[in-house]
């Protein structure tokens, strides 16, 4: 009788160990697949990312592609600056790495971005009901200068009108 009870305990112990091992394997697998997925941000848009652990320091691989602002110890705001790939590294207060993840910045499918090539010259337009010039990395210098000066003139006009009211 005692021998049967001991045998049952060993069988139960093996079952529990196998269940715990399965749970541990599953949790490691899901966390590693989550790390493999990049953070996707659209150009000229912001994205909030909430973290499970507090962070102390943020390192962005290429700040010309994406910018990151620490909103709180558990919240980051990503801003897409130009299309491309970079990475982000998060460190805790003891300078231990919490995360090293790819960041992908792309144009939104709904952005209405139209790129026009004239020989070697490239111009970008944002098209809704009307197309307006917009500045993107790779546009011709003359086009970029014209769009920026038109934007500056519009901002000065709006500022002047706001002061008059």
Image (tube, rainbow, N blue to C red):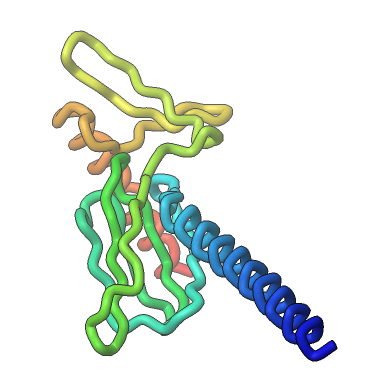
Tell me: residue 150, above or below residue 63. above
Q: What residue is drawn where x is 42% and y is 71%?
A: 76
Tell me: residue 1, above or below residue 78. below
Tell me: residue 147, above or below residue 119. below
Q: What residue is drawn where x is 28% and y is 14%?
A: 117
Left or right, residue 72 beside residue 138 = right
Left or right, residue 69 beside residue 137 = right
Q: What residue is drawn where x is 14% and y is 31%?
A: 141
Left or right, residue 78 beside residue 3 = left
Q: Residue 42, image x and y in percent?
A: 44, 46
Residue 22 image-quadrant placement? bottom right
Along the viewing direction, whichever of 160 and 139 lies nearer the viewer: 139
Q: What residue is drawn where x is 32% and y is 45%?
A: 151
Tell me: residue 113, above or below residue 78. above
Q: Residue 106, image x and y in percent?
A: 40, 40
Q: Residue 7, image x and y in percent?
A: 74, 79
Along the viewing direction, whichever of 28 and 155 lies nearer the viewer: 28
Q: Which residue extends farthest top? A: 119
Left or right, residue 38 beside residue 117 = right
Along the viewing direction, whichever of 51 and 25 lies nearer the viewer: 25
The quadrant of the rendering that contains the N terminus is: bottom right
Residue 147 image-quadrant placement? top left
Q: How many labels does the image show?
A: 0
Along the viewing direction, whichever of 14 and 16 lies nearer the viewer: 14
Q: Residue 125, image x and y in percent?
A: 39, 29
């Amino acid at each position: 009788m005692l021998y049967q009870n001991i045998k049952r305990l060993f069988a139960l112990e093996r079952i529990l160990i196998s269940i715990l091992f399965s749970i541990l394997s599953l949790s490691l697998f899901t966390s590693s697949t989550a790390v493999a997925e990049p953070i996707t941000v659209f150009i000229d848009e912001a994205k909030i990312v909430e973290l499970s652990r507090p962070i102390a320091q943020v390192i962005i691989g290429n700040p010309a592609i994406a910018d990151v602002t620490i909103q709180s110890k558990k919240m980051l705001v990503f801003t897409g600056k130009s299309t491309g790939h970079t990475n982000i590294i998060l460190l805790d207060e003891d300078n231990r790495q919490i995360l090293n993840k790819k960041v992908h910045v792309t144009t939104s499918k709904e952005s209405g971005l139209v790129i026009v090539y004239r020989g070697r010259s490239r111009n970008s337009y944002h098209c809704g009901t009307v197309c307006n010039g917009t500045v993107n990395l790779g546009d011709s210098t003359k086009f970029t200068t014209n769009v920026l000066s038109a934007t500056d003139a519009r901002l000065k006009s709006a500022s002047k009108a706001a002061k008059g009211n």
